[in-house]
Amino acid sequence: MKTMVAALALAALTTARVHGHHSFAAEFSSTNIQTIKGTVVEFQWMNPHAYIILDVTDSKGTTARWGIQSRNLSILKRQGLSKQTFQAGEVITVELFHHHDPMKNVGFARFIVKADGTKYDVIPGGRGGIVPPNP
Amino acid sequence: MMQRTVGLIAAALLVAVGWSQLDAPAAAQGRGRGAAPPADAAPGVPFTRTSDGKPDMNGVFSAAETRGGRESIAFQPWAKEKHDAFVARKLADNPTARCLSPGLINLTTVSFFPLQFVQTPGQMVVLYEWDHFFRVIPTDGRKQTDDPDPLQSLGHSVGRWEGDTLVVDVVGFSDYTWIDNNAGIHTDALHVVERFRMIDQDTIEYRAVLEDPKAWTKPWNVAATLKRRPPADALMEYNCSENNKPDDFPSSDKLLK
């Protein structure tokens, strides 16, 4: 039983983990676009990608933790974001490109909207909805 | 009505003042500092010249967004096979995914990473925000090297002015870059001729013709419009390998419940 719990925990960990630099196309679907709303756990302002860790509660009251990748800091800065843009505890809505594996709570941010309606286009240079080259 | 009038006046002012004259905060209010400069803006103010009479390209520029496809590379069969295999693997092998060089064309034409021209008599230096790349392009009349060793991801560049166009010849490429991001493989036989032509103070037309007799069946043509960034928009750092530890990135304690 203990082993099984450990195995499940490991599986959960692997599922939730987003990892280093990679090819966008290898990781994310450019057609499976999801919109999720949740509470910011942490906004990680760093290169080569900023991350948002987001808790999303569904209609049944179950909370899932998402790892959302974004662009690097120079791009985000030019799009009007800063280290202070998102605070832990605030509710945001994120439109994202879902991971190829729809069971993974991992995505790449496309638009991020704050509760007051402020909308950030975090993929500048997108060509007709197609994601540009991964930096 | 009032709003519309104000809008029209603002639009007229914009045209009169020119996009480059907008200060960053004003631009930020409207479209964000990263809003792509319009590719088809009305002709701007004529460009100035440097002390040696060349078009003055000094400044920070970025490629305007382009819609529509780009010409595909015509691969020889062996290269097509390799290219197709990379595509089948969803481009996971992209060198940039390992923080390796994006190559000449991506550095110049990907809209969200600006580049800066630093022009002195006899030399053009190009600084790229994307991963700190740079090129030093002599324009002092020297010939292209006949010994391009060591091979470099951005090759060896030699420039010359043809009228108001800076023409840059590049050889000696290492063979690992994807010269177009979609598995645009090439060999060390790659030869690039770039043309930078200043249209007005805020616009440079970029054209490049690329040939690779070992991997491609015909030349590949690339074009982009480079627009001047707002005056306050300096190059920033983008260091791909920063924090890049595959196994504990990002700080994964937050992902564990």
Image (cartoon, rainbow, N blue to C red):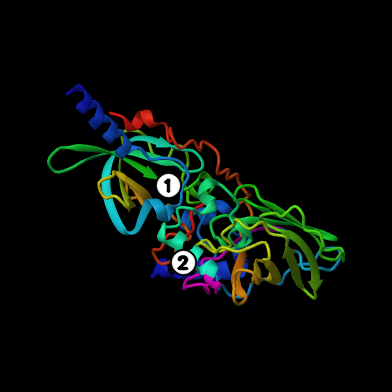
Q: Residue at x 22, y 25 (%)?
A: A3
Q: Residue at x 32, y 52 (%)?
A: A100
Furthest residue toward top:
A2
Q: Main secondary structure of the magenta part?
A: loop
Q: Residue at x 29, y 50 (%)?
A: A101
Mark closer to the observer (1, 2): 1
Q: Is residue B40 left or right of residue A83?
A: right
Q: State whether residue B31 is above or below residue A4.
A: below
- Chain letter of mark 1 equals A
Compare residues B45 and A119 and report the one nearer the observer.
A119
Residue B79 belongs to the span the image colors magenta: no
Q: Residue B137 lies in what quarter of the image?
A: bottom right
- Residue type at mark 1: give it: Ser
Q: Position of residue B72 (x, y in %)?
A: 52, 73
- Mark 1 and mark 2: Cα distance apart in space: 36 Å
Magenta residues (range):
B59-77
**Residue A105 seen:** yes
Point out which mark residue A70 bears.
1
- Residue type at mark 2: give it: Val
Q: Residue A115 lies in what quarter of the image?
A: top left
- Chain letter of mark 2 equals B
Residue B75 belongs to the span the image colors magenta: yes
Q: Which residue is mark 2?
A: B6
Q: Position of residue B166 (x, y in %)?
A: 75, 69
